[in-house]
Image (cartoon, rainbow, N blue to C red):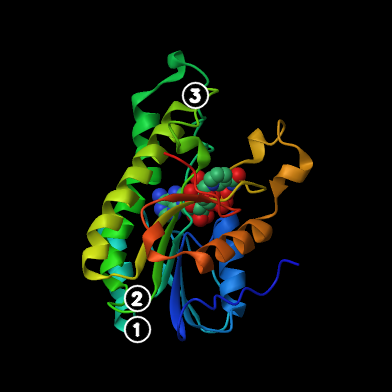
C-alpha cells in the first residue's frame, strides 16, 4: 500500500530538497522521492557524512546551528535548480548528552531550552529564510516543515515537554508569518507545518511505551501519508499545520 506517490499536483518535472535526509522520517522521504516519477533532481542534506546512493540525487552539507552552512547549501541547490518541494525533517527531542523532555518545572534548564530552540525553531527558520527565495515564481510549490501536534497550544491538555512544545509552537508561528510574506511574490507557494504522527524513529524510541501498536507508524507509512497531504495542498491552506491524515491542527 505504501509505495509510489505520484505528486500529480506539481505541474511538471520538479526538483526537491529533503533537509535532514539522514533522520528516520527524512530517509523515508528520500526513498519515496527518489522513486517519484516527476522528481527530476533530489538534493539531500545532512550534517554528517551520510552517503546517499539514489539516482538523480546529490548530498548537500547542512548544519542547522550554523547559518553560513544553511546559506551555502541553498546556494549549491540554486546553482542547479529551482526546487518546487522542500521538506524540512530535522528536529531534536533527546540526545546522548543527557537532554530529555522536561516532566516538570523543576527540570527546566536554560542550556537545554536554548539547544531545543536552536534546532527546532531557529534552524528551520533560517532554512525558510534561505530556501523560500529559491521556490519558482510560478506554479505550485511547497515548503513543508515537520512540526508536531504537541506544539499546538490549544491542544495541550496534558502538560510536560516544555521546551519541545514551546519550540514547535514558535516554529508554527514562524511558518505562518513566512507563509504570508512568501505569498506576496509567489501566489502558488505553500508553506506549512506537518505533524507526522507518532513514528518509529530514534527520536520517539524512549517514549513509545504508552503508544498503541496500531498508532505507531513506520517512517515510510508516515512519509507516504504526508506526501499525499502535500499533493492535496492548495495555496489557501498556506500557513497552517496539518496532520498525517490531512486534518488541520488548530494552533
Ligand atoms: N518520530 C515521531 O514520532 C515524531 C512525532 C512528531 C513530530 N516529529 C518531528 O518529525 C521530525 C523528524 O523526526 P524523526 O523522528 O525523523 O527524528 P530523527 O530520526 O531523530 O531525525 C532527526 C534529524 O534531524 C537532524 N538534526 C538534528 N540536529 C541537527 C543539526 N544541528 N543540524 C542538522 N541536522 C540536525 C538529524 O541529523 P543526524 O542524523 O545527523 O543526527 C536527523 O537527520 C522532527 O522535526 C520531529 O520533531 C517526529
Residue in view at x 59 percent, y 79 percent: 36
- Tag 1 secondary structure: helix
Picture coordinates of residue 107 (x, y %)?
46, 18
User: How far is mark 3 from mark 1, CA to CA?
Assistant: 43 Å
What numbered label is drawn on residue 102? Answer: 3
Q: Which residue was labeled with disc 2?
A: 77
Q: Is residue 103 above or below residue 137?
A: above
- For the residue pair 49 and 201, the one nearer the viewer reads as 201
User: How far is mark 1 from mark 2, CA to CA?
Assistant: 6 Å
> Looking at the rendering, in which quadrant would you find the N terminus?
bottom right
Q: Earlier in the sequence, mark 2 or mark 3?
A: 2
Image side of residue 38 versus residue 193, left or right: right
- Tag 2 secondary structure: helix
Task: Answer whether labels 1 and 2 touch (C-beta < 8 Å).
Answer: yes
Q: Is mark 2 within 8 Å of ligand 1?
A: no
Picture coordinates of residue 6 (x, y %)?
60, 77
Q: Is residue 80 above or below residue 202?
A: below
Residue in view at x 48 percent, y 56 percent: 89
- Tag 3 secondary structure: loop
Q: Can the viewer see residue 29 in this picture? A: yes
Picture coordinates of residue 66 (x, y %)?
29, 53
**Disc 3: CA contacts within 10 A as few (<14), some (14-19) or many (>=20):** some
Q: Is residue 116 above or below residue 234?
A: above
Which quarter of the picture shows residue 54?
bottom right
Q: Can the viewer see residue 53 in this picture? A: no
Residue in view at x 45 percent, y 33 percent: 165
- For the residue pair 6 and 3, the one nearer the viewer reads as 6
What numbered label is drawn on residue 80? Answer: 1
Amino acid at each position: 500500500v505504501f509505495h509510489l506517490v505520484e505528486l500529480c499536483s506539481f505541474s511538471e518535472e520538479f526538483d526537491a530538497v529533503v533537509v535532514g535526509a539522514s533522520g528516520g522520517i527524512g530517509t523515508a522521504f528520500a526513498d519515496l522521492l527518489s522513486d517519484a516519477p516527476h522528481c527530476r533532481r533530489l538534493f539531500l542534506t545532512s550534517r554528517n557524512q551520510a552517503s546517499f546512493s539514489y539516482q538523480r540525487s546529490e548530498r548537500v552539507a547542512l548544519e542547522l546551528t550554523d547559518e553560513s552552512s544553511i546559506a551555502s547549501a541553498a546556494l549549491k541547490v540554486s546553482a542547479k535548480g529551482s526546487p518546487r518541494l522542500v521538506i524540512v525533517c530535522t528536529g531534536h527531542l533527546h540526545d546522548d548528552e543527557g537532554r530529555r523532555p522536561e516532566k516538570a518545572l523543576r527540570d527546566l534548564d536554560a542550556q537545554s531550552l536554548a539547544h531545543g530552540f536552536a534546532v527546532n525553531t531557529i534552524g528551520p527558520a533560517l532554512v525558510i529564510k534561505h530556501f523560500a527565495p529559491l521556490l519558482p515564481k510560478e506554479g505550485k510549490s511547497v515548503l513543508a516543515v515537520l512540526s508536531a501536534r504537541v506544539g499546538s497550544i490549544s491542544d495541550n491538555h496534558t502538560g510536560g515537554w516544555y521546551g519541545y512544545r514551546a519550540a514547535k509552537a514558535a516554529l508554527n508561528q514562524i511558518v505562518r508569518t513566512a507563509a504570508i510574506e512568501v505569498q506576496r511574490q509567489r501566489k502558488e507557494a505553500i508553506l506549512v507545518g506537518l505533524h507526522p504522527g507518532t513514528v518509529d524513529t530514534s527520536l520517539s524510541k524512549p517514549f513509545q511505551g504508552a503508544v498503541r501498536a496500531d498508532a505507531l507508524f513506520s517512517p515510510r507509512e508516515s512519509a507516504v501519508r504526508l506526501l499525499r497531504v502535500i499533493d492535496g495542498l492548495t495555496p489557501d491552506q498556506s500557513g497552517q499545520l496539518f496532520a498525517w491524515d490531512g486534518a488541520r491542527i488548530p494552533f
